Amino acid sequence: MTTTLDALFRPKSVAVVGASRSRDSIGGQIFHNMISAEFRGPVYPVNPNATDVQSVAAYRSVSAIPGDVDLAVVAVPRAHVMEVIEDCGAKRVQCAIVITAGFGELGSAGKEAEALLRDRARALGVRIVGPNCLGVLNTDDSVRLNANFAHAWPPSGNVSFCSQSGALGLAVLDFARDIGLGLRHFVSIGNKADVSANDLLEYWESDDETRVILLYVESFGNPRRFLEIARRVSRKKPIIALKSGRSEAGARAASSHTGALAGADAAVDALLAQAGVVRATTLEEMFDAARLLATQPVPRGARVGILTNAGGPAIIAADALSSRGLSAPALDAATQAKLRSTLVPEASVTNPVDMIASATAHDYELALPTLLGDPNVDAALVIVVPTKSAAARELAPTLSRARTTDKPIAACVLGAYGESDRAALEDAGVPVYTFPENAAAAFAIATRYARYRARPAASSLAIDVERATQRPALIGERWL
C-alpha cells in the first residue's frame, strides 16, 4: 500500500540542503552518512556557496536539481528554513526532514514560527518531520537510508523506533549496534509539527517487516487519535513505550526540550493501558523486551521454567520473576521423572532445574526440550555460567532447535568468559542477557502484552480523563 510516508521511508532520491564539505557540520555529517550507507538512489548536496561537496557536484537550490527529488533533509539556519520549504514545494518534494532547531521548543514566538512553517508546508503538499530532530533511518537493504547525523549504523532487523528526542536517538542507535538489536526504521520526530507518532503507528501497522514498535514520547498531541490507532495496531504487533515526564521536574524539562506539555502520569498510564501499549520504566527495560518480542513468540502465560548450571543465578532469576508478577512453578511429576533419568543424581529437577556446574552442552540438549514440554511452563530461561564443561557457544544449536516450540526462550550468560560466546547464541535467534533481572523484565513486558491481546476487544474500559488527570484545564485536543 502506497502512503504519503513512502517518500520518507523509501525515497528514490534525496536532497541534503545545507550539505557541507566539512563533516564537523550537521549538514556535512548527514551527507556523509547518506553516501557511506550506500543509499540506493541519487543523493544531491545543496549548498549555494559550493560547487561541490565531498567530491559530489552541488546545487544552489533544490529547484536547480535536474532530476526528481522525493525527500529533502533540511539542515540550514532557522531564518532560511521557510524559503527551503518553498523551494521544495516548487520542486514537488513530498517529504522534508527539518533538522533545524529554534522553533516550538523556545516558547511562544518559536511556536508561532513552527505553526507558520507547518501550515505553509501542508499548503505546498510537503510532509514535515521535525523540526528540531535527529533525522530518519531505514536499514532495508533495498533502501539503506541514513538521513540523520548519528555516527552509528545499527544492524538490520524488525524493530521500528520513534523518538521524540534526537539526543536520545543518538544514544539509542549506538546502543542498538552494541547489543545487536536489529532496527528496521528509526525516526526522530522532534517537535512533531506535522508527522507524529500516530502517523508512524499507522504506517508501521501495514509494514509486514516491522514486528515490534518502540516509542519514546514526551507528550501526546492528540491522545484520542493515539488511543484509536494504538488499540488497533497493538492487536497485531507489540508497542512498547517509554513516556518521560513522570515527575514535576521531568515535566518541566520536557516542556523546555521539545515544547511538550506533559500531563499527569496517572492519565498516561490509563491511556497506554487502554491502548494496549506496554509501558517500560527504563530504556534498558524497553530494549530488553524488544529483543525478546522481536525474535520469540508471545508467551501464553506467566510461568517460566529455569534451566541452569549454577544455583545462585537461578535463585536470583526466580526472585526477579516473582517481583515482576511472574512465577517459576514446580514442574509436572512426569517432567521431573524424565529429567532425573537423564541428568546426574545431584541435579535438582523441580524448577529451577539446576544441572550443577559439571553440566555439558549435551545435558542442556537433553533437558531443554523436556522443560519446554512441561504443561506448567509458558517460557524458558536458560542460564549459563561458562565453564570448560559448558561453553556458551556450544549451546547455539540446542537453542536454535528449541525455537520450533511456540514458547519463548531467553538466555542469560554470566561472566566475562562468556562475552565472546553471546554472539553465537544471538545468531541462533535467542536473545541473550547479561543478568537474570534483565531477562525477567523482558518476560514481564511480553506477558503484559500477551494479557492485553488475549482480552476480547470489547472488554476495554472507558477512561474518565478528567478524573484521571485531575487537571481539567489540560483536557482537550492538546491534552498531555
Image (cartoon, rainbow, N blue to C red):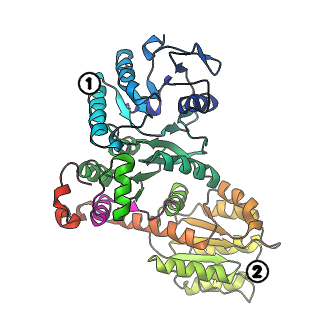
Q: In this view, does 176 lie above or below 90?
A: below
Amino acid of disc 1: Ala
Which sits in the foreground, 250 or 307? 250
Residue occupying image coordinates x 44% and y 48%: 165
Residue position marked by numbered label 2 in the rendering: 357
Q: Position of residue 296 (x, y in %)?
A: 53, 59
Instruction: From the viewer's perspective, tell me whether residue 227 is left or right of residue 142.
Output: left
Point out the stretch of residues depicted in magenta. Answer: 262-283
**In this rendering, the label closer to the viewer, 2 or 1:** 1
Q: Residue 361 carries which label?
A: none
Q: Is residue 17 above or below residue 171?
A: above
Which sits in the foreground, 156 or 348? 156
Q: Where is residue 358 in the image (x, y as percent from the top left)?
A: 79, 80
Q: Residue 123 carries which label?
A: 1
Q: Is residue 282 magenta?
A: yes
Which sits in the foreground, 407 or 224? 224
Using the numbered discs, state the Cα–Cα distance from disc 2 to disc 1 in whole angstroms. Answer: 69 Å
SS under mark 2: loop
Quadrant holding the C terminus:
bottom left
Residue occupying image coordinates x 40% and y 63%: 449
Amino acid of disc 2: Ala
Residue occupying image coordinates x 45% and y 25%: 72
Q: Which residue lies furthest to the bottom in this view?
A: 346
Q: Earlier in the sequence, mark 2 or mark 1?
A: 1
> Is residue 93 at all visible to an observer of this figure?
no
Are discs 2 and 1 less than 8 Å apart at CB? Answer: no
Q: Is residue 250 above or below residue 44?
A: below
Q: Position of residue 233 (x, y in %)?
A: 35, 51
> Is residue 304 at all visible to an observer of this figure?
yes
SS under mark 1: helix
